Image (cartoon, helix red, strand yellow):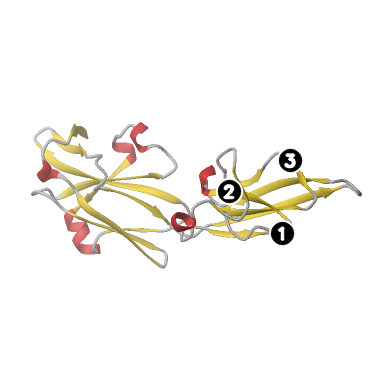
Amino acid sequence: MEVKELTKQTERITDLKAEIFESTLTLRWKWQGDSDIVYIFKERASKNIEDIEIDEDCVKLYTKDEYREFNGYVEKIRDINEYKFIVFPAKEEETGTVLIKQLDGDNQIAVCTGKPEIIYEILEHKKLFSKIKRVQLIVFVDMPISKDTLCYVKKKGAYPESENDGLKFQFPADFHVGKNEMQPFEIGKDEYIKVFLNDVKKSGSKYILKRR
């Protein structure tokens, strides 16, 4: 397989869309030119696609006949994660199959293959007659999540009701799969902590946030 830069607008893949029904993911797009083949690239969305070397081992050849037969590109969902798909234009030349390196966004889409749960726990340690208490936040996730996804809020006198109801703090590092423990810290005995999605409009439909 040979890789060439995109030089003709007529070779571009556009209108890439994803649909999830039960345990099946379907990708559909607008074919361009007279090409009957594409290469499909799939990688976890947390990785920087521009840094990945594209070769035959990381792409899948897909034909227009297969697209017609299955009404798109279809694959079974086997885990909950966020993936990035890129549908590269391709063509047959005398020297072999050529992948056209289109990286303008129209042929890329991020797909979350489920709604993962984020579970957090707040451990409090109080000393009798002390004016402070020691707190530790623990977050459990099913898939890698950026530190910007969550925030925690401190409020005096009552638990905060939203990400804007009190003093807002960002987490110091991204969350890996499993248990993530923050370093314990001290707050006033009449202060309360709660974890929220940092941007509800952006992430509210992608994650389920629960307190243990």
Q: Secondary structure at mark 3?
A: strand
Give the total of numbered labels: 3
Residue ID for mark 3: 185
Q: Which residue is mark 2?
A: 151
Left or right? Give the position of 34 relative to 171.
left
**Residue at 16% across / 45% down in the picture?**
12
Instruction: Determine the CA span between mark 1 and mark 3.
Output: 19 Å
Residue 94 x, y percent position in the rendering:
8, 35
Q: Nearer the viewer, residue 207 or 148?
A: 148
Mark 1 or 3 closer to N-term? 1
Marker disc for residue 158: 1
From the viewer's perspective, is residue 58 above or below residue 159? above
Q: Is residue 105 above or below residue 19?
A: above
Give the position of the C terminus as an image quadrant.
bottom right
Q: Position of residue 26 (x, y in %)?
A: 31, 60
How far separated are the C-alphas under marks 3 and 2? 15 Å
Assess whether mark 2 and mark 3 are in contact (beta carbons under 8 angstroms): no
In the rendered structure, find residue 26 and report the number of the disc placed on it: none
Residue 91, how many percent across, how many down? 14, 42
Q: Which residue is located at x 52 percent, y 57 percent? A: 116
Labels 2 and 1 touching (C-beta < 8 A): no
Q: Nearer the viewer, residue 4 or 112?
A: 112
Real-space Cα distance between discs 2 and 1?
17 Å
Where residue 193 sits in the image (x, y, percent)? 69, 52
Along the line of sight, which residue is nearer the eye, 205 or 98?
A: 205
